[in-house]
Image (cartoon, helix red, strand yellow):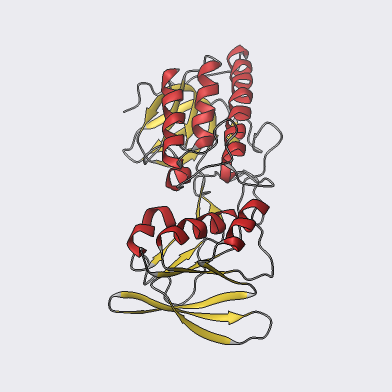
Amino acid sequence: MAKSSFYDLIIVGGGPGGLSAGIYAKRAALDAVLLEKGVPGGQVALTKGVENYPGILEISGFDLCEKFVEHAKSYGLEIVQQEVVAVDPGLDFHSVRLADGSILNAHAIILAAGGKARKLNIPGENDNFGKGVSYCATCDGFFFRDKTVLVVGGGDTALEDALYLAKITRHVYLAHRRDEFRGSRILQQRVKADPKIEILFNTVITEVKSDAQGVVGAGLKDTQSGEERDISVDGVFIFVGFSPNNQLVPAGVKTDANGYVTTDHKCETTIPGLFAVGDLRQKYANQIVIAAADGCVAALASAHYVELKKASAECRLPA
């Protein structure tokens, strides 16, 4: 339960962007609350190993998130485990409606809702979710020890998870629709050097095949020759990007063609006092360090915005 009904700042989402915003908001002496419907950490909490966060050579995603939470709480950030169902902008203040029916108000709101795994929408994908189809190797890889799996994708996540699965499975097929990966060079080198990973360039998956027990294979198609074939696999791990969790983005906020919120250099949206950070915001790359930086920028900008609102004679608080 929130301690107040009116805050300087409400942060919606508890991933690296939201938690970083919380740290900087409290350092700026803002009365702030962070709302998160699940366990703080977001997608990062599902990542087995993080090797590219400055100052930390290697750490699990869960442990890194724990450090974020611990840091934020050390400044006294209020964290409420409650689902936000709507964000309602206003002229004098903004409001969020919670699943329990309560309403919280604030001068500024930072949206840090993150994103979700994108699906291929192929036959057998939805039917076999949890029965061999997965979007998180660190969550489900254990169930495929000494088995054969197919990883789909060519970005950092696909390469990282293919390497992780290669450590515990018998064989890993890695299918990518193009003739080269999009992931970082160091990950590409590791993947190509791993004898348990079989790379299938110019290849898309057309179907997940299954029986009563779950996944038994996958249909593949060569994007250049059009040739189709089936392979036997026990699991299919899909990493083809993320879609922004933009359900809470109010009307009037500008987004791009893919649904990502467009902001200025302060992470402020087209509605004054409403900010967007992390995987929800349109930018060049999605990385933990970038989400954390977004949170810092948005919190500092929010502090300036709140200061101006409080100084304005037109600022009217709710009764």
Where residue 169 sits: x, y (%)? 41, 64
Q: Quadrant of residue 292?
A: top right
Placement of 316 over or under 243, stated as above or below: above
Furthest residue in direction right, as rendered: 265
Label count reads 0
Quadrant of the rendering where the N terminus is positioned = top left
Where residue 47 sits: x, y (%)? 46, 47
Note whether residue 94 is visible: no
Q: Residue at x 34, y 41 (%)?
A: 99
Viewer-proximal residue among 173 and 218: 173
Viewer-proximal residue among 207 and 22: 207
Furthest residue in direction left, as rendered: 212
Note whether residue 271 is visible: yes
Viewer-proximal residue among 89 and 173: 173
Q: Residue at x 66, y 56 (%)?
A: 257
Q: Is residue 240 left or right of residue 36?
A: right
